[in-house]
Image: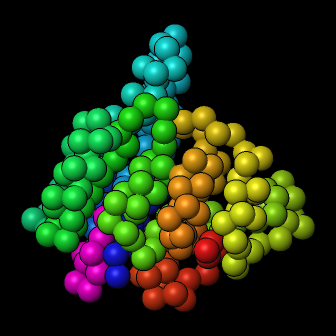
């Protein structure tokens, strides 16, 4: 299978320790024995904190700061994966896609964010389009998609399966500015619908869920 794994920055930076990054590196290397893997790293809390410090900067400048945080996470993860990883360093997205085409299938591709004004969700979606991915996994800090915020509404319904249309209707109600995507970027979701790619949203704090998502036995939500 051709798999894109989007790992939320909040997962990667929850514990700033080699052992924490190695949990994800080990799972990715295990999957790469049988599948072609692309990993896109988010910025998470680190990106938001640096963006907040630069509160007097322009929106574009603050977006760029957030992007750099994704690359710090990506470079760290790639270094822990080791020789099997290929890091696509920051550059305009169009150039990153050329590099992806050149190196895909040869190494585990590790990437961050690229153009300002878009999210790593969108980058994961466009990478999926380029490699004709069979599956996109969004590893985040929630265990799936709900009808409402489960932290605020204890009666919120969790979905095991959704259509792309229903998913976009749910996330369309959420904040859609870089650094504030509450579940998934609407622009990225639209692209996944366009290319008919399966998306799985899981609680990535349990790294085994990433493996289970590839097998199809995860506890999250499948969108297709």
Residue 36 sits above or below residue 5 on the image? below
Residue 30: give x, y in percent of width and height. 27, 81
Question: Residue placed at 23% from the left, 56% from the top?
Answer: 100
- Residue 137 seen in this snapshot: no
Q: Please tell me in which quadrant of the rendered image residue 19 appears.
A: bottom left
The residue lying furthest to the front in this view is 194
User: Relative to residue 150, is residue 67 drawn left or right?
Assistant: left
- Residue 62 seen in this snapshot: yes
Residue 34 sits above or below residue 73 on the image? below
Residue 28: give x, y in percent of width and height. 30, 72
Position of the N terminus, as image quadrant, is bottom left
Question: Residue placed at 40% from the left, 61% from the top?
Answer: 129
Residue 39: give x, y in percent of width and height. 34, 61
Question: Which residues are the magenta region?
Answer: 29-38
Colour scheme of the rendered structure: rainbow
User: Relative to residue 182, is residue 109 drawn left or right?
Assistant: left
Question: Residue placed at 81% from the left, 63% from the top?
Answer: 147
Residue 76: give x, y in percent of width and height. 25, 51
- 135 or 75: nearer the viewer: 135
Residue 73 sits above or below residue 78 on the image? above
Position of the C terminus, as image quadrant, is bottom right
Question: Residue placed at 52% from the left, 87% from the top?
Answer: 216
Q: Please tell me in which quadrant of the rendered image residue 12 appears.
A: bottom left
Residue 16 sits above or below residue 81 on the image? above
Q: Is 39 colored magenta in this rendering?
A: no
User: Relative to residue 103, is residue 149 drawn left or right?
Assistant: right
- 55 or 5: nearer the viewer: 5
- 106 or 95: nearer the viewer: 95
């Amino acid at each position: 299978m051709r798999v894109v794994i989007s790992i939320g920055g909040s997962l990667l930076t929850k514990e700033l320790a080699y052992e924490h990054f190695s949990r994800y590196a080990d799972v990715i290397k295990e999957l790469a024995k049988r599948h072609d893997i692309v990993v896109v790293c988010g910025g998470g809390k680190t990106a938001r904190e640096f963006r907040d410090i630069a509160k007097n900067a322009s929106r574009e400048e603050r977006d760029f700061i957030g992007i750099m945080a994704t690359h710090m996470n990506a470079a760290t993860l790639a270094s822990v994966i080791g020789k099997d990883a290929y890091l696509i360093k920051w550059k305009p997205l169009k150039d990153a896609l050329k590099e992806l085409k050149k190196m895909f299938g040869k190494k585990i591709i590790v990437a961050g964010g690229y153009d300002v004004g878009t999210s790593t969700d969108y980058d994961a979606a466009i990478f999926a389009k380029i490699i004709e991915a069979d599956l996109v996994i969004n590893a985040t800090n929630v265990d799936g998609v709900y009808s409402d915020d489960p932290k605020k509404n204890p009666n919120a319904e969790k979905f095991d399966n959704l259509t792309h249309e229903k998913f976009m209707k749910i996330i369309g109600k959420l904040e859609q500015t870089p650094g504030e995507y509450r579940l998934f970027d609407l622009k990225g979701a639209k692209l996944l619908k366009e290319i008919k790619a399966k998306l799985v949203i899981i609680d990535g704090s349990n790294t085994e869920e990433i493996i289970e998502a590839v097998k199809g036995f995860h506890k999250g939500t499948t969108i297709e």
